[in-house]
Image (cartoon, rainbow, N blue to C red):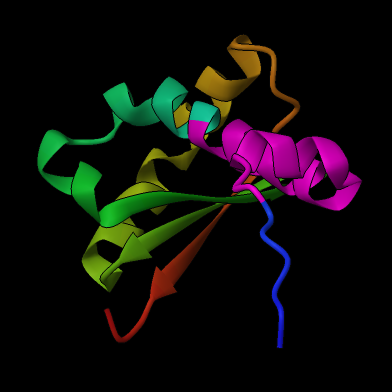
Amino acid sequence: MNRRSVPPFTLQQAAEGSPTLASLIARARDANERLRAVEGLIPPAMRPAVQAGPAEGDVWCLLVNGSAAAAKLRQLSPMLVSRLRSKGWDVNTIRIKVQSGR
């Protein structure tokens, strides 16, 4: 069997060729930018336990390791929403999802 050699290509090149992949990359970038915008409001010791999740409409999801961190984020969520809105994101609700088995 003769395999044709295909030159490697970057993720950027793949995204440019696939609207679905480009959309996924843009959503991930947006979620990470949101997290960077609010990370100063999250206690430093808790930051490693928090990851950016998807945004759907005016709801943004934060993924967190552990119920104690989730409870604290729920307390902080009004401030997080306020910060995001001041930075131009249309967010009304932050959903907290506890990651299990990590």
Q: Find residue 9 and report its horizontal and vertical position in percent.
A: 63, 43
Can residue 92 be seen in this snapshot?
no
Q: Nearer the viewer, residue 90 or 55?
A: 55
Range of residues picked out in magenta: 7-32
Q: Position of residue 20 (x, y in %)?
A: 85, 51
Asked if residue 102 is among those painted magenta in the image, a careful observer would answer: no
Q: Residue furthest right?
A: 19
Task: Name which residue lies at 80% across and 43% down.
Answer: 23
Residue 17 versus residue 100: which sits nearer the camera? 17
In percent of the image, x 24 and y 55: which residue is there?
49
List the single residue furthest toward the front: 2
Horizontal side of residue 12 vs 61, given as left or right:
right
On-image quarter of the N terminus:
bottom right
Q: Position of residue 70 (x, y in %)?
A: 34, 61
- At horizontal 69% and vertical 55% (from top left) the residue drawn is 6
Q: Residue at the spot x=30%, y=86% of the render?
A: 101
Q: From the viewer's perspective, is 88 left or right of 84?
A: right
**Residue 9 visible in image:** yes
Asked whether, in this view, residue 88 is left or right of residue 37, the answer is right
Number of labels in the image equals: 0
Q: Nearer the viewer, residue 59 or 53?
A: 53
Occupied quadrant, residue 85: top right
Q: Main secondary structure of the magenta part?
A: helix
Q: Position of residue 94 (x, y in %)?
A: 58, 47
Specify the quadrant that holds the C terminus. bottom left
- Is residue 21 found inside the magenta-colored segment of the image? yes
27 versus 5 height, above or below: above
Give the vertical position of 28 relative to 96 (above or below): above
